[in-house]
Amino acid sequence: MLSTACANMDNLEMTPLYSQATVNEINSVYVASIDGQEGVYLHNILQAGIDTSNDPKYRLQADISYTEKNLAIGNDSSITRKKIDVNVDFVLVDITGSGEVLTSFSTIGFANYSSSGTSYLTEVSKKDAIRRALSIAGQSAILRLSYIFENGILTK
């Protein structure tokens, strides 16, 4: 079956996810500071995927919120597993003069963690889950920006 799927590979036209022009637009985005320890982590995730040029045209602002949900309850009625949902609201602002909001969007990330054991282990596990969820949300934001720039979905 694999050979059948690959047999027509010569007839397929492969195109990159986004063009060089889109990469240039993404790299003209300045990631604004984000409040809190989670904000610093998300800022670093975004900066790893956006190679901001010396002359940025856009500012990306973010606001993080998260909620926890109980997933599992032990025999002694204690919560043993929780889920963190991270929601990040983004705003892309034109900084070349007008200062207008060009677009806004949200991304989400989620991760589970163990809440059994000591309170220290639970806190460490929770922080790790938040970072994993922020990483998902940050990567999703970079993909969303590439889609916005590639398809010309700005209000400008």
Image (cartoon, rainbow, N blue to C red):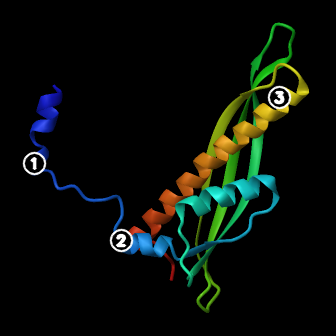
Q: Judge left or right: residue 107 versus residue 12.
A: right
Residue visible at 74% across and 68% down in the picture: 33
Image position, residue 97 (x, y; %)? 61, 92
Residue visible at 65% across and 43% down in the picture: 133
Image position, residue 56 (x, y; %)? 57, 81
Name the amino acid type tagged 3.
Answer: Thr
Name the amino acid type tagged 1.
Answer: Asp
Figure check: 107 above or below 102: above
Residue visible at 83% across and 28% down in the picture: 122
In the picture of the structure, the residue carrying the numbered disc 2 is 20
Image position, residue 127 (x, y; %)? 77, 39
Figure check: 129 above or below 70: below
The image quarter in which residue 2 lies? top left
- Tell me which label, 1 or 3, sits earlier in the chain: 1
Q: Which mark is residue 10?
A: 1
Q: Residues within 10 Å of mark 3 (few under 14, many from 20)?
A: some
In the picture of the structure, the residue carrying the numbered disc 3 is 122
Query: Helix or strand or loop: what does disc 3 sit on?
Result: helix
Q: Can residue 123 be seen?
A: yes
